[in-house]
Image (cartoon, rainbow, N blue to C red):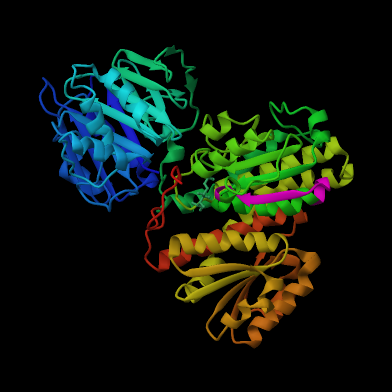
Amino acid sequence: MCGIVGYTGKEQAAPILLDGLSRLEYRGYDSAGVAVCPEGGGSLCVHKAKGRLKVLCDLLDGGAAVKGTVGVGHTRWATHGAPSDENSHPQVSRSGKIAVVHNGIIENYGELKDFLQGQGVPFTSETDTEVVAQLVEYFQRDGADLLTAVGRCLRRIEGAYALGIVSADAPGQLIAARKDSPLILGYGEGCSFLASDVTAILRFTRRVSYMDDGEVAVLTEEGIACYDHLMQPVEKEICRVDWEIDAAEKGGYEHFMFKEIMEQPEALRRAVFPRIREGEVFLEDFTLPEEYLRSMRSIHIVACGSSYHVGVVGKYHLEQMLRLPVEVTLASEFRYMDPIVDQRTLVIVISQSGETLDSMAALREARRRGAKILSIVNVAGSSIARESDQVLYTWAGPEIAVATTKAYSTQLAVLNLLGLHMSRVLGSMAAEERRAVLEDFRTLPEKLEKVLANRDGVQYYASQYFNRESVFYIGRNVDYALGLEGSLKLKEISYVHSEAYASGELKHGTISLIEPGTLVVALGTCLRLFDKAMSNILEVRTRGGDVLALTTESRAADMAKNANGVIAIPDAHPMLLPLLGVAPLQLFAYYAALMRGCDIDRPRNLAKSVTVE
Ligand code: AGP
């Protein structure tokens, strides 16, 4: 969840670290810090500040105030210890000679802290990370070099970590270590980098390798040496990242979230068009054998947050296409629930970042039980992608805003394509029906452009309703699933209390909450259930609630008879309507948050990539 960056080379490190951190701030933003090995030796220069990165940048004059060519930087999303200067990273050892940045949680830190305190080591923070700095120093008491001491330390710590370590006694050197938390190595000309996310170093190099669990790396300006958990040298594969640097910039937009909402038509073109050939789905590098697909007895989708909501839509669609049972479970629940999963279950893991810890743990649990793993992932080379039997990339480009938008729509599109592909293998769907969906997929980006072009209407409704205390999203079938996503978008960025319910459930309790002034967003894109949606809207209106409805252009006039306001999306194949319907919900949340003065790209308490449990 935190952001890590490290540099060693000939340039001044601090400006490079601050630039990298500015691209990682979306990962965590309650405090930031850097540690730089000073030119000519001596103690480390460590600077930390509570608050947004800007505070630190101003303090360091954009980095000009710190001299030295090796260093590490960090943006924090607090786990152990409240945001404060003391609890910010880098955490330093007692002598001030070793500095550590860390993403993850050291689970046995209490026990280690007791041990070190028993040895007379004083602690200055409440963090779990400080034990790493102190322990490395402790293991150097016999004169061991930095790498040896880090190796000893790693054998003692438990939990998840991506670590960046510098020592005043090992100038020019940067040590990286990874377990269950992403860490990327970057190869430059006469310099080396480490980062928790490729966007941090993209300006400086496109040549990267992905550290695996248990690996340790020594970075110098000459290059990078990597070792496995037994300290045996490992040859890393160097990949080229082809993301455009601009894609991770705001490009004139006020917020990343808005930019990413507007990028959806293009992202869908990238995700879908190359995968449709001669009227059939073509999935690149698809290696799951057809015999395996025919032997499948069930599908289990696991994911978190919005990716889970994609899975909920997917359950409806895949069951319809494949006539196979499809379960969808929150990854955080799956891993502890003794799931019924075996060799004949295909487990689909959906994740934008490919690094979400719960999703990763669910993947491993499913694999342990013999399931095949197919993942739908945005970030190439991410941990989930690498541990899957089959990966389908969403090709959405970097997603920076904490609130996901283009990742949601591309995940859903790819899941639909996967379902169509499997339906051909299983013979579970008429070929004409499949072609009809694929045909409509071709016009989808244009239709979505139209929805986005009509955003003024959504903005108007947001201006009417942004100050409501409670908002309920209701719908049936995929509209229920869409409501889950609309509700999450609203609450995460605007802090308005909102809940999503299956419309049929209203009468079983929730309707008692409807009173004059309550806003209900009624989703009516599932046209075969349109009349039911109309009845539920009337039930809300009768009790004084206001209804903002979403339906297709062909039914908008009917809907307007019952609702206070209607947002219309173009008609399309039912399977594609959620892809059009989600955009106005994203925009509604965006405008509501804007009108409420919220920090849209950095909502409180959240981070982009959730790499702790
Ligand atoms: C959605 O807007 C969220 N930021 C969050 O729910 C997110 O979808 C979830 O944390 C899963 O992330 P992932 O797709 O990277 O695994």
Q: Is residue 162 left or right of residue 42?
A: right
Residue found at x 61% / y 58%: 582
Q: Nearer the viewer, residue 345 or 543?
A: 345
Q: Which quadrant holds residue 519?
A: bottom right
Residue found at x 58% / y 45%: 335
Quarter containing the N terminus: top left
Q: Nearer the viewer, residue 437 or 332?
A: 332
- Where is residue 262 shown, x and y percent of the image? 53, 51
- Where is residue 514 shown, x and y percent of the image? 58, 82
Residue found at x 31% / y 23%: 152
Asked whether residue 174 is drawn in magenta, I would say: no
Residue found at x 71% / y 72%: 504
421 vs 241: above or below: below
- Where is residue 202 shown, x and y percent of the image? 40, 30
375 vs 581: above or below: above
591 vs 355: above or below: below
Residue numbers of the magenta segment: 320-332
- The reply to whether residue 280 is visible in this rendering is yes
- The reply to whether residue 14 is visible in this rendering is no
Q: Is residue 172 left or right of residue 156?
A: left
Asked whether residue 329 is drawn in magenta, I would say: yes
Q: Nearer the viewer, residue 592 or 475?
A: 475
Q: Is residue 365 left or right of residue 82?
A: right
- Where is residue 455 shown, x and y percent of the image? 55, 62
Count every numbered label the image shows and give the total: 0
Q: Which quadrant holds residue 12?
A: top left
